[in-house]
């Protein structure tokens, strides 16, 4: 489900075009007819549906019907800018993913990249999580980290995070499709995940200061 540019949708379309990818995109829903992402979907031959109703309940009912008609097993929000009806969120519980451009639970809501810059954090990134009725809350599936530099502004940080999003969302959907995500007490256990990357990243980097200086 999208509302605009659709670059995450595009990343998912590209991933799903790979014959080894374990998921296919059966429907793209947009709440805005002018969403650029609809063009990407159309070009890829994916059915699209615009549900423009401003009424939250009516929107949810139409979306739910369309999703069930297509046999969708997972709903991925990709730049979908509306708050969903609680009943919809509950009925798709643990089958509804969102991507957010911050390391949740830091900086939920609007303009997370701006929030990160104002807080002066040295790292930010993006999060794929299962959706709960509270905005940008829910069990975390995967995160990607990017370093924040002194020269960064909202545009440069957003672009770096977006590039990470395009790698992270296909990974998270793949894990879901492989049935490797299990929600245990509002935390996500990932099947087969034994170790995390060992790298430690310092920012500012150690090279900034001389050893012993
Ligand atoms: C992304 O930054 C996503 O994390 C956020 O909205 C933006 C959507 O971008 N939820 P796009 O439409 O996928 O290009």
Image (cartoon, rainbow, N blue to C red):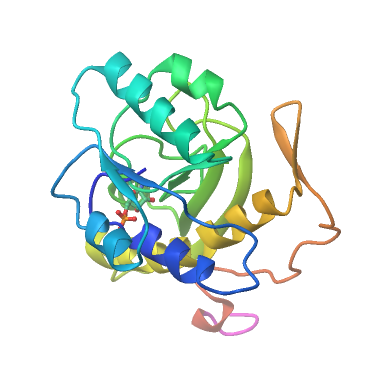
In magenta segment, residue 210: yes
Depth check: give the residue in front, 1 or 62: 62
Depth check: give the residue in front, 20 or 187: 20
Rendering coords of residue 59 (x, y %):
29, 23
156 lies left or right of 170: left
Q: Residue at x 42, y 26 (%)?
A: 64
Q: Residue at x 43, y 53 (%)?
A: 121
Give the vertical position of 103 relative to 137 (above or below).
below
Depth check: give the residue in front, 153 or 168: 168
Rendering coords of residue 195 (x, y %):
83, 61
Give the vertical position of 175 relative to 213 (above or below).
above
Q: Residue at x 28, y 37 (%)?
A: 81
Q: Which quadrant is the N terminus positioned in?
A: top left
Q: Which quadrant is the C terminus positioned in?
A: bottom right
The quarter holding residue 165 reads: bottom left
Q: Is residue 52 visible?
A: yes
Q: Residue at x 28, y 17 (%)?
A: 58
Give the vertical position of 200 relative to 57 (above or below).
below
Q: Main secondary structure of the magenta part?
A: loop
Depth check: give the residue in front, 145 or 166: 166
Residue extending farthest left: 34
37 lies left or right of 193: left
In magenta segment, residue 14: no
Q: Is residue 148 visible?
A: no
Rendering coords of residue 55 (x, y %):
22, 17
Rendering coords of residue 130 (x, y %):
57, 36
109 lies left or right of 53: right
Q: Magenta stretch?
A: 209-213
């Amino acid at each position: 489900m999208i509302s605009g540019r659709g670059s995450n949708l595009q990343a998912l379309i590209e991933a799903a075009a790979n014959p080894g990818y374990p998921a296919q995109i059966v429907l793209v829903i947009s709440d805005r007819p002018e969403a650029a992402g609809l063009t990407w979907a159309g070009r890829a031959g994916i059915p699209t549906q615009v549900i423009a109703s401003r009424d939250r309940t009516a929107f949810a009912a139409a979306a739910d019907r369309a999703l069930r008609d297509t046999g969708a097993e997972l709903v991925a929000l990709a730049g979908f800018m509306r708050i969903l009806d609680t009943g919809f969120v509950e009925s798709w519980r643990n089958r509804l993913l969102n991507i957010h451009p911050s390391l949740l639970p830091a900086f939920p809501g609007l303009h997370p990249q701006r929030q990160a810059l104002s807080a002066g954090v040295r790292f930010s990134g993006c999060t794929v999580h299962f959706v709960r009725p509270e905005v940008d809350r829910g069990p975390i599936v995967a995160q990607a980290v990017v370093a924040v530099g002194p020269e960064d502004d909202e545009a440069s940080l957003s672009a770096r995070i977006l590039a990470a999003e395009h790698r992270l969302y296909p990974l998270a959907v793949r894990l879901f499709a492989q049935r490797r995500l299990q929600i245990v007490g509002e935390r996500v256990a990932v099947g087969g995940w034994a170790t995390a990357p060992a790298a430690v990243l310092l920012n500012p980097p150690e090279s900034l200061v001389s050893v012993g200086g």
